[in-house]
Image (cartoon, rainbow, N blue to C red):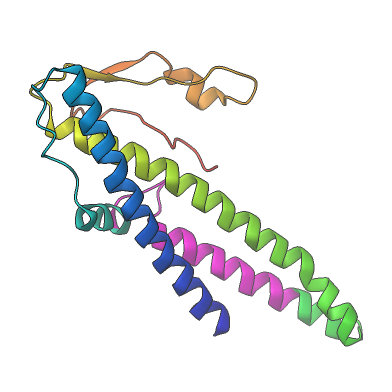
Amino acid sequence: TAAGTGYAEIRRMMVDRLATLGTTQAAWAADLLDDATEGLATASRIVSKARMREVLGSEYMQGLTLREWVGASEAALVRGATAALRNGVGQGLEAEALRRSLAPVYRTARNNLDAIARTAVTFTTNRAHMATYEANDDVLVGVEFLATLDSRTTPICARWDGTTWPVGSPSIQYPPLHVN
């Protein structure tokens, strides 16, 4: 389908750009560690773009991989457009009215992709930082969850503010803890 081709391209572009972002964030985190530890951190252990692609293809954001998130968005678009068109044809709508009936479906699809992109950026930057911290666990004691405590902070994120874990702990919480 045309949607499938478009969504495949969206997914490919997202993975490529997110992998680049991840390597940039990992390098930045390594540089900060190197500066903070006066050279004790091994900044050369930076996450590669290939590793970031692996992470994006296999690790879960809220229980789904990036591919699954984009696939779910595509399925919702197809389902919504099909329903709108079937309903419109059943009501005898003219072509222009049918086109207008699709506007909310496309708006929802765009909002879904925006939310996926924001969540994926947060996931990628935090995963890159965690990989850098794990590669430098010889100079780090632990990691701390810091939330910006303002009117937009969710209770999910506020709950973990100030909590610390040893580097590499399987119980570490880091954003995104929810979509968007």
Task: Report the magenta residues as a range.
Answer: 58-83
Image quarter of residue 49: bottom left
Q: How many marks?
A: 0
| Magenta-colored segment: predominant secondary structure | helix
Q: Nearer the viewer, residue 120 or 79?
A: 120
Q: Nearer the viewer, residue 168 or 44?
A: 44
Residue 60 appears left or right of 147: left
Q: Quadrant of the C terminus?
A: top right
Residue at 44%, 49% in the rendered image = 120
Q: Is residue 90 visible?
A: no
Residue 74 appears left or right of 121: right
Residue at 27%, 28% in the rendered image = 171
Q: Examine the rendered structure and indicate whether residue 44 appears above or below residue 101.
A: above
Q: Is residue 144 visible?
A: yes
Image quarter of residue 140: top left
Residue 154 appears left or right of 173: right
The residue most toward the top is: 162
Pinpoint residue 177: horizontal percent, then vertical percent.
Answer: 45, 35
Residue at 25%, 26% in the rendered image = 32
Q: Quadrant of the N terminus?
A: bottom right
Pinpoint residue 108: horizontal percent, then vertical percent.
Answer: 69, 59
Residue 104 appears left or right of 36: right
Does the magenta run of residues contain 178? Answer: no
Pinpoint residue 37: horizontal percent, then vertical percent.
Answer: 15, 17
Q: Nearer the viewer, residue 107 or 139?
A: 139
Image quarter of residue 27: top left
Does the magenta run of residues contain 63? Answer: yes
